[in-house]
Image (cartoon, rainbow, N blue to C red):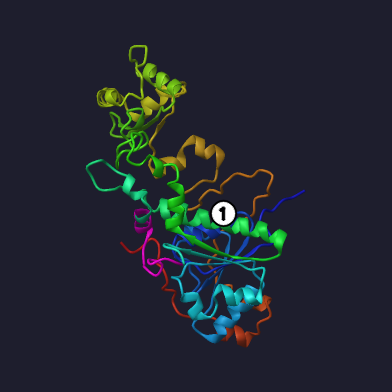
């Protein structure tokens, strides 16, 4: 029997910045029909996140455009938007209005600070949300400024993934109750949730300060080392048996010392730095290939796309073709390509709008919401 994941689920996507488009790409990868409702030409600001989607253009500032959107929402399972709180209400297409027409509808708002709280209306980006969550304050060197991991933390992990998880849960719950619901997906909330393991450790020996701690780069057996060719190796030998294998692999005299003794860390770090500087990164990778001690290369993005392990799992992996994850071999893979063509007429005609209604509803303006990606640097 063929399985198609979210096949039959219709999602209307009103988002522009990274968290929303990535969330809907994940859902499209699972088989959902995603209709991106633009306010202009229908072009997507981030093509890499646009596969498997249909693009239409509506003028949501006009009554005809709003009416057309409501007609579409009557046929939808999920509406995802990323406006600041209050915008959907001012447009007259808020969750209450849409769900009064379609009680099965799930409405998800992806924002930085959420729908409530004193900072709810404020503008921001990944760096701001990660900063407010306490996560950014724990990253980086002890005596330097915080270091942020691109926009992966708040935008994609705290925003996209938490929103997608909420939508999947809401779809499952609807199977039992017949009712949709409203999802308030705040990127700060997602980051706060992901800090659950680390909040209790803050200020204690395992994480006393930024850049200092077992997982923060202080431990000599859990950090990166510069190699002879200027590239880096990642060492994650936390458990005793892995540390012992690392110690032996580095040619150091046995027995290996107690590795959780913080007093020994500075001298051990200096010793490891000297040793790793003696060979190139790839020479160390080859040396440790047969030793089970959690040593891997630090790859740049181009190297990661070409790495044999990644290529073996995802032969089509490329910079312009993000992989589909997780792997679900019993679910038939849905075809997914990026087609930026404007499908406004056919999508609206399918829900019963006339040619005149379609002409009145669509927008011919150039889309300006969000930040086109990549920007013109």
Q: Position of residue 135 (x, y in %)?
A: 37, 49
In this rendering, position of residue 57 left or right of residue 226: right
State the residue at coordinates (33%, 64%): 376
Q: Which residue is outermost to the left?
A: 143
Please say whether residue 278 is visible from this viewpoint.
no
State the residue at coordinates (26%, 22%): 271
Residue segment shown in magenta: 116-131
Pick the front one: 284 or 212: 212
Identify the residue position indicated by label 1 in the image: 165
Q: Position of residue 158 (x, y in %)?
A: 46, 54
Q: Residues within 10 Å of mark 1 (few under 14, many from 20)?
A: some
Task: Examine the rendered structure and indicate whether residue 368 appears above or below residue 286.
Answer: below
Pick the front one: 157 or 276: 157
In this rendering, position of residue 264 left or right of residue 359: left
**Quadrant in the picture for the C terminus:** bottom left
State the residue at coordinates (40%, 42%): 200
Question: Does 80 lie within the magenta span?
Answer: no
Dominant SS in magenta: loop
Question: Does 123 lie within the magenta span?
Answer: yes
Task: Examine the rendered structure and indicate whether residue 317 appears above or below residue 69.
Answer: above
Task: Say what secondary structure mark 1 lies in.
Answer: helix
């Amino acid at each position: 029997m063929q399985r198609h994941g979210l096949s039959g689920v219709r999602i209307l996507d009103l988002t522009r910045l990274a968290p929303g488009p990535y969330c809907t790409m994940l859902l499209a990868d699972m088989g959902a029909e995603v209709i991106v409702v633009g306010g202009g030409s229908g072009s997507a600001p981030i093509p890499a996140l646009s596969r498997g989607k249909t693009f239409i253009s509506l003028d949501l500032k006009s009554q005809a455009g709003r009416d057309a959107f409501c007609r579409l929402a009557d046929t939808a399972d999920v509406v995802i938007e990323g406006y600041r709180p209050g915008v959907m209400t001012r447009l007259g297409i808020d969750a209450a209005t849409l769900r009064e027409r379609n009680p099965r509808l799930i409405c998800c708002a992806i924002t930085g600070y959420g729908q409530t709280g004193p900072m709810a209306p404020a503008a921001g980006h990944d760096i701001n949300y990660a900063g407010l969550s306490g996560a950014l304050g724990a990253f980086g060197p002890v005596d330097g400024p915080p270091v942020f991991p691109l926009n992966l933390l708040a935008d994609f992990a705290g925003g996209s993934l938490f929103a997608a998880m909420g939508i999947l849960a809401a779809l499952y719950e609807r199977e039992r109750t017949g009712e949709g619901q409203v999802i308030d997906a705040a990127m700060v909330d997602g980051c706060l949730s992901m800090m659950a393991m680390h909040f209790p450790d803050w200020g204690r020996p395992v994480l006393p300060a930024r850049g200092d701690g077992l997982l923060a780069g202080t431990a000599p057996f859990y950090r990166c080392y510069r190699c002879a060719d200027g590239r880096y190796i990642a060492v994650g030998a936390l458990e005793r048996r892995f540390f012992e294998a690392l110690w032996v692999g580095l040619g150091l005299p046995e027995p290996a010392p107690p590795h959780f003794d913080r007093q020994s860390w500075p001298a051990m770090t200096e010793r490891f730095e000297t040793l790793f500087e003696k060979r190139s990164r790839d020479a160390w990778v080859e040396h440790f290939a047969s030793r089970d001690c959690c040593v891997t290369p630090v790859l740049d993005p181009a190297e990661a796309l070409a790495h044999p392990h990644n290529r073996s799992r995802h032969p089509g992996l490329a910079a312009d073709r993000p992989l589909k994850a997780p792997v679900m071999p019993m679910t038939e893979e849905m075809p997914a390509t990026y087609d930026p063509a404007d499908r406004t007429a056919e999508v609206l005609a399918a829900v019963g709008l006339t040619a005149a209604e379609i002409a009145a509803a669509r927008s011919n303006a150039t889309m300006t919401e969000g930040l086109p990606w990549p920007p013109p640097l």
